Amino acid sequence: MSKNYGIIDQRTNPKGKSLPNRQRFVKREKEAIKEAVAERIRNGRIEDLAGDSGQRVKLRSKRADEPTFHHGPGGVTERVYPGNKQFQKGDRIPRPQGGSGGGKEGSPDGEGEDDFYFELSFDEWRDALFDGMEIPNQIKRALTGEDEFEWRRSGLKSDGAPNQMDIQRTTQRALARRHAFRIPLLRRKVELEKELKELRNTVANAGGKDVSREEARITEVLDELVIVERKLKSVPFLDTFDLKFRRHELFPIPVTKAVMFAMLDVSGSMGEWEKEMSKRFFILLYIFLTRIYERVEIVWLRHTSEAKEVTQEEFFTSRESGGTVVSSALELMKTIVETRYRVEEWNIYGCHASDGDNFRYDNEKVLSLMEDFVLPVSQYYAYIEVRKPYMGDGELWPVYEQLLEGHENLAINHIRDKDDIYPVFRKLFEKKETKHA
Amino acid sequence: MPNTIAKAAPIFTEAEWTPELLETVTEEIKKIAEEELELSYYPIQIRVITSEQMLDAYASAGMPVGYAHWSFGKHFLMNERAYRSGQMGLAYEIVINTDPCLVFCMEDNTMTMQALVIAHAGFGHNAFFKNNYLFQRWTNPDGIVDYLLFAKDFIQECEDKYGIDEVSSTLDACHALQHYGVDRYKRPVKLSFEQEKARMEERVEMTHKNLNVIWRTLPEPADGEVKKEDAERFPKDPEENFLYFVEKNAPHLPSWKREIIRIVRKIAQYFYPQIQTKVMNEGFACFTHYYVMTRLHEKGLITEGAYQEFLHSHTNVVAQPDFDSPYFRGINPYALGFNMFMDIKRICEHPTDEDRAWFPDIAGKPWLPVVKYAMENFKDESFILQYLSPKLIRKFGLFAIRDDDQEEELVVTAIHDGDGYQRVREALAGQHDLGVNAPNIQVVKVDVRGTRECKLVHHAIDRRPLDEKETGDTLLYFYQLWEYPVSLYSVAQNGADIEHWVCDDGKEVKHHKNTDLDFSMD
């Protein structure tokens, strides 16, 4: 019986053979994924959206279909089933709900997946969410000299404190140097010793011949040997230019912390709808920031005619009545920044959502607070005006609008409908090149 | 008679497998397969893989090499999601029809499961691939891996030359038509890389020549109307292999696209026997593993514990839930196939009077040649028609239900009794007949002189309609390859036009339904 089988352990073979195909699929479905993501933003539960797990999205894409010719339900079919208990021939059975009974089974290759669900990893989800968006001014703060610094190893240098000596490099170099210097000398020594031996032999076996030339040569060789020996001894075990020390340089530490001031107008004119819209916007901003920074804190500020720092819970639930004084929120933001978030350490983001009503005499103050404090310290400040479509601009709109000139880190936009949130968000963070003046 | 032969020591006592143990157990299985079952099979390559690699293998239908396409990624994602969420277990093995026969085993299998898998796939499926007439006639297992490599490289080359999107959309269209990319009756030529390469250029030239004949614009000398009419009838006979038809006759396709069509249809053709022998193939593999594992146990080569573990897993695999069970997913091919082969063995060894009446040719005969004859010479449909016994129909409690959408209720047409056996048999056989399950659609006519419209006809049997949602989309793909108008007519048995789809521009399909047809029946 010959051996006609073999066993191969393939477990160490590269896995992920399907990865390129998976990527192709995700790329192909880019548009549909974007649409699915936008839909999640519109209708998903906010708690789910802010989590850091993957997101299950439903693709409704014709491009993912693989249609074929096959039977649909209808007509006459006869099928065999197992497990008969009480049926007799000729029994009539009411049709099970869901159309003609055998229809679905009648087409084994034809059960088209109506909806194709699949899980986006958290990274894929965020990438889809923020595809094509720019990280506002992130680089600036990370690379300017005002940041914190730390010492980092950066190569070697040839002088320094003994405790910084790189022993391994140093001994390596010493060894190399000793070899380089000693080997030619050693070779010469061997040569000379050999010659000396031969000369002495000649002299010893001279038998009356004239050996004066050989004897003279012996003296020369002996002299040279002394010199070679001395040179060999003089090659030091460690020389100063063998020494290598670790070099350290100061590197700026990129700021990896961000604080987001979510400011919400909760005055009487802000209804549930307006708050819901604002909340969804804040969540998007939050996810966006977590993509960039290791740590993101949120300060929830609520304001009517007075501003208050609240918990996230309170932020979205209770409703207050009263007028609107926007500057109170900006004042509070200023106080909090000054006491808790050093501008050098923190990237500061502000986002204000309001229906646009403001106490008329407050506008002046808003303007100056924005210009003198908020805009200079913020990486980015966004104002969104949540307003039903039939209403015109609010009173705050022109206030912020006049600040646009000369402040690249300010963006303002309207949200008039649930469907606006995502596009508006995208627009606010659009790549600079496409941003209109 | 007392068995006086001393039992051997078990090969393994622990659950963990090792390469050495795999060797030893394969050697013992081989003895049983060759000496007792007298199986002839291809050399075996057992490859141990991880669950991730198994998911990869799933996505490519087990093919060791495959060309790149997004749809494989989609299937990978679907399987992965189902697997990770616990909705789907992975197969213990996957095997395809190659020579040598590649058997992929999961690393997390226990030693017992590895033995089961080697018996099931390495010997059962393997012998089936080698000996069943459909596989012998339709596939060339020694050439397939080379051919897949050729296909992969060729498609990669096309992507480099013409862009991924262009190639991918051609593949989309081919995939949509791949169920209509097989010759059901003609025998395909051998697949091999060398021949393919050598013939490729020749083919390009031939295609152009053929096309010129069909599409020549100069009028022929008129030898009388009738003859001319006849000569212009194209294709001469209705064509059911759409991919073949398009590859050979589409007016404008560049030759690389024709080659891609050819690749898809060759691969579809290669898998065609597997679709037609699911019940038999799994049944025979289960029969083999059951026989082998039982014999290993009798010889004392596996422990009592291992045998119990095997039985547990085996019972799950060949279980058939009743129609009203929440686990019911249709007829389980493993259950039906395994029980049928076991039943054939029983009929040979211990026939009843009923068996003698139904199976006079095999009742009481030596079982091994009968089982092997059955394994070699049938496909699911004919196998069921030939061998499904009344006893098994009773065991499964099989009954047939007729569903007529014009009637209020379903009707039980046959149950497991004297009256019903033959009808149940026929209905179950029909259920496994691709000719019944796949809609009968053919290319009947091309308007050679005029619009070049290609007309397809669907012969609706038992009024079964084409799927409303996907038919139009699939026709669009047909247009994409044909590049001239295509139409599809669904006609009733009496020739009436039930509904039709027309695509004139490749953008949109017009669907027309004839609602006032009288179906009071012929």
Image: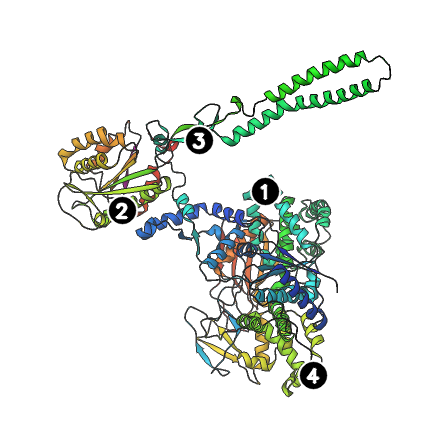
Which amino acid is tagged 3? Answer: Arg
CA gap, disc 2 and disc 4: 80 Å
Looking at the rendered structure, whether the residues under marks 2 and 4 are on a common chain is answered as no
Q: In which chain is the residue bearing label 1?
A: B
Q: In which chain is the residue bearing label 3?
A: A
Q: Which label sits in the foreground, 1 or 2?
A: 2
Query: Which tag, 2 or 3, sits closer to the chain's start?
Result: 3
Which amino acid is tagged 2? Answer: Lys
Which amino acid is tagged 4? Answer: Gly
Residue, disc 1? B159
The magenta segment: A408-415
Rendering coords of residue A293 (x, y %): 35, 39
Looking at the rendered structure, whether the residues under marks 1 and 3 are on a common chain is answered as no
Check residue A238 in the rendering and tell me which mark sits there, or answer none.
none
CA gap, disc 1 and disc 3: 46 Å
- Label 3 sits on a secondary structure element that is strand
Looking at the rendered structure, whether the residues under marks 1 and 2 are on a common chain is answered as no
Residue B132 included in the magenta stretch of the image: no
Q: Is residue B214 left or right of residue A71?
A: right
Which amino acid is tagged 1? Answer: Glu
Check residue B364 in the rendering and tell me which mark sits there, or answer none.
4
Q: Are marks 1 and 3 in contact (CB under 8 Å)?
A: no
**Is residue B479 visible to the viewer in this orientation of the structure?**
no
Rendering coords of residue B159 (x, y %): 59, 42
Q: In which chain is the residue bearing label 2?
A: A
Residue, disc 3? A153
Residue B157, quarter of the rendered image: top right
Q: Are marks 1 and 4 in contact (CB under 8 Å)?
A: no
